[in-house]
Image (cartoon, coloured by chain):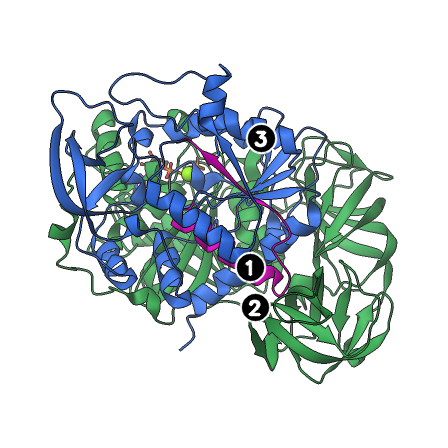
Amino acid sequence: MNVELSSGLKAKRSNSLKSLYKMELVRISTAGSVDDGKSTLIGRLLFDNNALTKEQEELVAKKTAEKGWDDLDLSVITDGLVAEREQGITIDVANMYFSTDTHKFIITDSPGHVEYTRNMVTGASMAETSIILIDARKGLLEQSYRHFYISHLLRLKRVIFAVNKMDLVEYDQDRFLEIAVEIQRMVEGLNAAVPYTVVPVSSLKGDNVVKPSENMTWYQGKTLNGLLHETHPDISESQPLRFDVQHVTHSQENGFVDYRGYSGRVISGTVSVGDTLRVLPSKKESVVTEIRRYTETKDKAISGDSVSISLADEIDISRGAILVHPDETPEPQQTVKATLVWMDEKDANVGSKWLMKAASREFPVKLQTILQSVDPTKKNATDNKNVIALNDITEVEIRLSQPGYFDAYETNKKNGIFILIDPQTNNTVAVGFVKGE
Amino acid sequence: MKNQHLYDLENESIYILREVASQFKKPVLLFSGGKDSIVMAHLARKAFYPSRIPFPFMHVDTGHNFPETIEFRDAFMKELGADLIVRYVQDSIDQNKVQEETGKYASRNSLQTVTLLDAIEEHGFDACLGGARRDEEKSRAKERIFSVRDDFGQWDYKRQRPEPFQLLNGRIQFGENVRAFPISNWTEEDIWSYILQEGLELPSVYFAHNRKLIKRDGQYLAHSEFVNIVDSDEIEERTVRFRTVGDMTCTAAFLSDAATVEDVLKENVASKHSERGARIDDKRSESALEDRKKGGYF
Ligand SMILES: Nc1nc2c(ncn2[C@@H]2O[C@H](COP(=O)(O)OP(=O)(O)OP(=O)(O)O)[C@@H](O)[C@H]2O)c(=O)[nH]1
Ligand SMILES: [Mg+2]
């Protein structure tokens, strides 16, 4: 190892001190079937963006030599567990980080194996864009349908289909077009509103990942890296205010007399000093006197901000309360219709009881009705089952032990989601997307 | 000009810290005196201001720390007004719970685990906040924000709970505890940029200074009574800094003139080495950290 750190100080990279300037934090996730090349693709993105550390480069060189490959084995960068490298598959989500002059990316490598679909959902839930890989030789597989369906369910801002391993089909344009047509059919079949793009790549050789391909001059579009740079963070300022109270801060310290602030996060919308807020569930109202973040006070907080709000009146507010504008109050629900993605080995039936966690609220709920199970591949039309099993996507009706104040996921993502917790095992067993009436 | 991505990361970390304070009965913040725990402590200060940070700090002291770090730690705690619990690996050794390693590469780094688990049990802590980052190491990249550990502190990647939308489930059985990582999504560069932006103080070993060193296997170690010096070692005096401050026995120094946070940032960006490259204990084997984590290490 080279200890002369300063010798490398010629700063080949133009982006020195880039982090001091405004950059966008963008989250991307990958999906696709086993062995489509997701891990290799992420490795390639990092490698060609000059974002690998020396240690990572050494690991790649070592593993490549061990396997005796001509091309670099870039999958070892994300496959960080011993079991993964031994089996050559991804088991658990890995988060990788890299930045360019304008963007800071958090990219999750998800496993392709059906067994680990829950990890794919987790990876994609925070993402603005998901990349679904397709093996050019195989075309769309069951997992492609499933992952596209989940991306659609998540209402991602964009899906990029990366048709990978183009080197194994002689970089053939016709093959690419065939797959593009298959994709178009899938999207139309779902009536899906997700904007999508298709790009032909070879992760192993590097075509169209960061560098434009010399082998596919017939492709005029942007490289994958170019497409990722069109992504911007999702900030929902124009939506109704939903403020989640996580914690009540009382203080007599730091020169404050009887400070009381409701600490939490602006889930959606904006809140300003002087606004009248309604507290749910109590429905009491009061005016915002201060919005604080540490020693700084602000006129306004927007979606995503972690702040503390003080009100003019002393009202009883505790963890789990929601603050809203009175004219935009969500309806209290006794039951919710939702799409569940089931994540546990143990099945569920009508009557199953769980704890629901939505923002800071946690309360018992019960599965009232199984409305319909969804088959993303559309092979078996609507096969109605009365059990919910691992990786199933199911539309259900859930009875709540206290009123929910959800918005439909479609109109307000952050206030339209929940997880279910098994009270016996404490496992997170499902994620739910609230449906509108 | 507001630094948007640091602001976003700060939003996320404050959210996580508040979840920990609310979901657990007895959380503790593990404080090593290194840059990541300093940033974490600063974020905790922000999350609960104007009230005090609602949990104590704990340092598992291997006895092989840089004296500069310990000095900094005590001054920092005093300024913060937080309670600090210190537990010593030496005590675990004296009680014959662990055995001191011998030989050239002897280190107390993995012995810490036993002292940590004992302290967790002694105090009944149900959550330990740690400053680990996912960009540090390949098995860290797989860590959840809430990582459930069994009675023996073991990490089982197969038991990891999904965290869609960062909805954090901290429910545990008796005897289990959670390791919570509020700065999971920060990179080393983010940490340094944030230190610069917020004007945070750091132990002096992070900046260029003259030091007596042991040159071994092409790397420099700080000269100290804790390192077993062998014939092939060369003793030199050089201007160096440390990118991570673990134990003196297993943290390598970099030759550097970077005297300020800005210099450090520039130099780190230009260098392609990761800070973990300076952790000699991670090089024992390819899966050194994963193995230690399975055994209850942080
Ligand atoms: N020829 C060729 N091989 C590729 C390409 N991309 C990936 N591969 C190979 O395909 C195999 C699987 O690649 P991975 O990156 O591990 O696939 P993955 O999608 O991450 O697999 P899972 O995570 O287990 O689902 C490896 O042998 C890769 O080297 C490509 O563009 N061309
Ligand atoms: Mg993979």
Chain of residue at mark 2: A
A418 up-or-down from B8: above or below: above
Tell me the quadrant of the picture where the N terminus of chain B can be found: bottom left
Would you identify the image quadrant in which residue A191 lies? bottom right
Label 3 packing within 10 angstroms: few (<14), some (14-19), many (20+): some
- Residue occupied by mark 1: B45
- Residue occupied by mark 2: A294
Chain of residue at mark 1: B
Q: Distance between the residues labelled 2 and 3?
A: 31 Å
Query: Chain A, which colour?
Result: green
Per the image, label 2 sits on a secondary structure element best described as loop
The location of residue A355, given as percent across then percent down, is: 78, 44
The location of residue B264, given as percent across then percent down, is: 26, 57
Q: Is label 2 on the same chain as label 3?
A: no
Q: Single out the residue that lies furthest toward the bottom.
A: A274
- Residue occupied by mark 3: B119
Chain of residue at mark 3: B
Mark 3 belongs to which amino acid? Answer: Ala
Whether residue A315 sits left or right of residue B25 in the image: it is right
Mark 2 belongs to which amino acid? Answer: Tyr
Disc 1 to disc 2: CB gap under 8 Å? yes
The location of residue A13, given as percent across then percent down, is: 20, 60
In depth, the one of A216 and A120 nearer the eye is A120
- At horizontal 37% and vertical 45% (from top left) the residue drawn is B69
Q: Distance between the residues labelled 1 and 2?
A: 8 Å
Q: What is the span of residues highlighted in magenta in the rendered image?
A: B33-62
